[in-house]
Amino acid sequence: MNEECTFEDYQKSMADNKILGVLCADCNTITAPPQAVCRKCSSPNLSPKELGKNATLQTFTVIRVAPDGMNPPYIVALAETDDGPWVIGNLIGVDPDKTDLELIGKRVTMSSQHTKGNLYSLADFHTLTFSLQ
Amino acid sequence: MREVAILGVAMTKFGNSEKTNIEMFAEAGLGAIKNSNIEAKDLEALFFGNCLGTFEEGQMHMAPFAHSVLGMPMSSPATRFEGACATATVAIRHASLLVGAGVYDMVIAGGAERTTAMGTPLATRTFAMGCHAQYESPLGITFPGVFGMAAHMYAKKYNIPLKELKRNMAEVAVKNHFHGAKNPKAHFQKEITVEKVLSGGMVADPLQLLDCCPFSDGSAAVVITSADKAKQLVDKPIYIAGTGQASAGPLYLQQDLTRVKAREISIKKAYKQAGIAPKDVDLCELHDCFTIAEILALESMGFYEFGKAYDSAAKGETRLGGKMIVNPSGGLKAKGHPIGATGAAQVTEVVEQLRGESGSRQVEGAKIGVVDTLGGDYGTVCNIILRS
Ligand SMILES: [Zn+2]
């Protein structure tokens, strides 16, 4: 156990449309995105684990005043994955101007998209997306 | 730990400043020194808050420059603190802990920030640097976006129609502007209406422009010493009765955004140390970066049950003359939010209130006041309880 799973590993998996987390050998909890210890019991006995694609949307916002380098409007959302972890991503395929609270509780499929970096970011990223099922 | 007290406090007018960060801090710091009846040479350390000086002025390592403009001795170290919006509260808490532990007898703490020098797009980008740079920022999340998500979750969780929640959120802005109109140091000193809030441009659904605090410039500073020394130096020392601080991870680990768990932990520690309960508090300066944020804070600080604070402003309970006055300074919303200075300005307001020096916005007979500051997207919360 204790296989290191870095942001670069996560990014490489995302490029293949695989969402990576880590599975705890001590309490069986999945932590995603990966980090050095389990989010529940802080154990470092972790190994990489690919998450399933299904999740439930828990909340969202439409960003209309955006940071330098982004193109609003777009939707940012939090979802609870069927594997346990909550993750943050962009809800795509939905018109930002036609959103309401009915979105909360909807089933979504997770995937990834390529996002350009900007002056202050590490690089270009593969970021998490949600699509309504 | 020995008892610790606050001597003099001072702040600049918040708003748009032509002065540099260091010049603003000189104004606040020298004011606090003068109000303490001491000299700069009496100060044994500086706890200096600043977040974004690198982007605002191309200035890193501001603490020693801030130290030098006050005329502090070289033997008194200056250290920079950064806890996003909670920066100065964290600096003051650590100053208080070290004086309490007997490491220092007399120190100064505070902060400065000149956010408007960046302009809105760069300011929005740099503020978003307070979110996780790998897993959150690349999605284009912003702080208004974080609290927009919290507002949507609040409406859903407590089954409140969004329209009704938004009207009540607007009442928070109206209330804080009502207070700010009485504060000559506030960024915005004019009253607004619910209709005006509800007709503003959308920033991050469901938050409109006047649901959001402004980008501001400003500085504030406080002098901290032992209770024994304070009694010799000023007529009305204000005692630091309790403090708390807690740290949470990134937003996605917070899950239920209607509950600021770091705050629940921080304030509990502070109440316990002070030996008080929420009902004992006369006034509170809390972190109303967005209207929904005030509602969440009122609940996690124990002033209201969860799901019950949303109409507190509409009912007049938190307004001057109400049962527990919240943000008599105008809060971040109207007083302004120069992030690295905000906590010191909150402490300044509570200290002046407990001394009975707050003029037309005085909370009559106030004896116990609480400061609450949240940094980043729920990552840092720091609380300070003050008593006269
Ligand atoms: Zn575990």
Image (cartoon, helix red, strand yellow):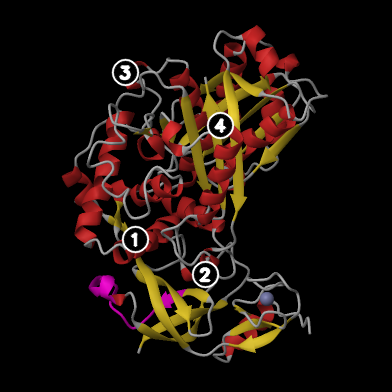
Left/right placement of residue B229 relative to residue B24 reads: right
Q: Where does the magenta region start and end? A: A89-102
Q: What residue sits 46% from the left and 66% below the top?
A: B140
Give the mark nearest the N terminus, 4 or 1.
4
Q: Residue at x 44, y 26 (%)?
A: B13
Confirm or deny contact between disc 3 and disc 2 (CB under 8 A).
no
| Observer-nearest of B126 and B253 | B253
For the residues labelled 3 and 2, the Cα–Cα distance comes to: 46 Å
**Image quarter (top left, top right, bottom left or bottom right) of the C terminus of chain A:** bottom left
Residue under label 1: B154
Amino acid type assigned to the residue bearing label 4 in the image: Thr
Q: Are marks 2 and 4 in contact (CB under 8 Å)?
A: no
Q: Earlier in the sequence, mark 2 or mark 4?
A: 4
Q: Is residue A132 above or below residue B245?
A: below
* Residue B222 horizontal/vertical position (percent): 59, 24
Name above or below for residue A2 compared with residue B331.
below
Instruction: Say whether mark 3 is within 8 Å of ligand 1.
Output: no
Location of residue B357 in the rendering, given as x and y in whole percent from the top left corner: 43, 15
Which mark's residue is nearer the viewer, 3 or 1? 1
Give the structural element (helix, strand or loop) at label 1.
helix
